[in-house]
Image (tube, rainbow, N blue to C red):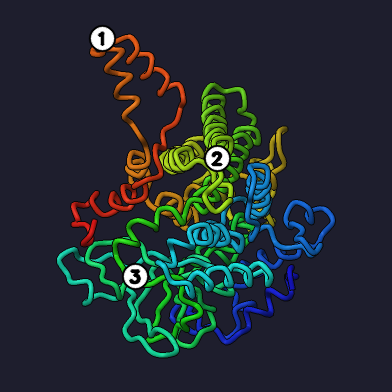
Amino acid sequence: MALRTGKMYREALRDGREVYVDGVRVDDVPTHPKLAPVVSTFERIFDMQHTPEYRDAMTWEGPGGERFSGSWMKPRTMEEGIWRRRMYQTVCRHTGGLFGRAPSDMGAAMLGILDLKSQFSQGRADREENITRIVEQSTTNDIAMAGAFITEQIDANKPIDETDVPRAVEEREDGLLVSGVWTVSTFAAYADECIFGTFPRPGQSDDHILYFVMPISTPGIRVVARTVHDFENHTEHPLTRFGEENDSLVVFDRVLVPWERVLSQGDPSFAVRVFPKISEWLHWSILARMAVKAELLVGLTALMPEVIGRTATPHSQEVVGEATRYLTTIRAFLYAAEQRGHISEQGWWVPDRIFVTAGRAYAAEHYRRMLANLQDLGGQGLISLPPEAVFGNDVVGPTLDHMFSSPSASRKERTTIFRAAYDLSSSSMGGRQTLFELFNASPWVTMRQQLVSNSDLDPFKDFARATAGLVDDESEVRAIVGRVAEEGMSGSEKNLYDRVGSALLTQSGAPLPEGK
């Protein structure tokens, strides 16, 4: 079963999983009114794989001629990497870039673990075999996988064992018993399986360092989904027609994790060193989706003045130009990351981390500015949008229909464009979107700190000293200039992830784990 249909995906969600929405357990995920729209959206994505139009854009052919989902494509060359990015952007464009997590996301994270399996397994041959087997099974079965790494915000003075940070509470012959809460797993309610992992934080012991993959339907796993924003009326809120993501908490109550599902376990210093690297392909996918989100922002920014006949005003020109620059810059980071990618020790193609990190930081930092531009363009037009039902009123409907019509656009087009801009910039759904973009896989301020940790700045310091006249020897100056001309910033792989992982802890003044 290399490629699933939408129907197969929908039916797989009827597996007895324990999902809660608005405090009530869901009887049937595919038909629940607040979950069904997202199920339908992903059902359509699965079906696209089987169409002549998208077959080659979304699937790849294995050695035996069988086709597999691009979600589980493992690039060996830059060309294959670019194909994978284009596949992901195809999925994103069919949801407007509005879904921060999709069935195709965690294949990228698992690729990071596969690439690092000899280190990730911490010397355990059985764990290394688990990694390889789970990736192969996920590829063969076209698995939709979620991810959960983030845990609760806690008082720094409170002992970690007095919190609900997940940990192994018992080791048995048949596996680990795990309890605790992962606080952010956006795709969990809609996934077949989920990779659960540990984000480095102060105070962790061996019991807290856990990486494993489990079916969502596993007894004792409880998904508590956030309520849906602006769901019921798609006419009033057109961007919700795809459904609205339910970020979820995932509660474990002494869940049995069989040994064959465990990827890594124990050693806090391991989590510090390794976590940053396993997310390289995932972060690259995030940047690719942000480029699609920027395409949507450019479209809305250009359409808003157009439908009210104001495209030639200086303000409109300036704002459309700024949105276009935002898109172009994100694309430039994306393309640079690909052109400067490299082949890992395991033979997989990896995008350049410097450009990926810098691009994500830029996209998140300027996202709010793009939304402010939509608000500035819309002004009173966003505030005074009448409900659709008013236009059918015999008394006021004709007047309002005339008022909202123009030589540039029909009343329907104008109000729909402005409602979409309101959805993204000003609604509760838009507010959640903004929070997600600002904190997805770490805030942009942290990304900047990671950028410094990733970078070898010594050649640039030497260049500044030489330019300032502090280096007298001409041969040394030539050597400095040569190093800067190489344009390399990542530096040696040795100790790189120690530095990045350590920065995640030390940025708040937290002590490093023993042995660091």
The spot of residue 211 in percent (x, y) is 42, 70
Asked if residue 86 is positioned above or below residue 119 in the image, the reply reads above
Residue at 69% x, 35% y: name it.
406
Residue at 51% x, 59% y: name it.
109
Q: Nearer the observer, disc 1 or disc 3?
A: 1
- Asked whether 101 or 227 is in front, the reply is 101
Image quarter where the C terminus lies is bottom left
Q: Is residue 368 visible?
A: no
* Mark 2 crowd level (few <14, some 14–19, many ≥20, 10 Å Cα): some
Residue at 59% x, 72% y: name it.
133
Asked if residue 49 is positioned above or below residue 254 in the image, the reply reads above
Helix, strand or loop at mark 1: loop
Q: Are marks 2 and 1 in contact (CB under 8 Å)?
A: no
| Residue picked out by circle 3 | 209
Label 1 and label 3: CA atoms lie apart by 52 Å
* Mark 1 crowd level (few <14, some 14–19, many ≥20, 10 Å Cα): few
The spot of residue 261 in percent (x, y) is 50, 78
Is 450 positioned to the left or the right of 157 in the image?
Answer: right
Q: Which numbered circle lies on residue 496?
A: none
The mark nearer the N terminus, 1 or 3, is 3
| Residue picked out by circle 1 | 472
Q: What residue type is labelled 3?
A: Ile
Label 2 and label 1: CA atoms lie apart by 36 Å
> Residue pushed farthest left?
157
The mark nearer the N terminus, 3 or 2, is 3
Q: Quadrant of residue 451?
A: top left
| Residue picked out by circle 2 | 341
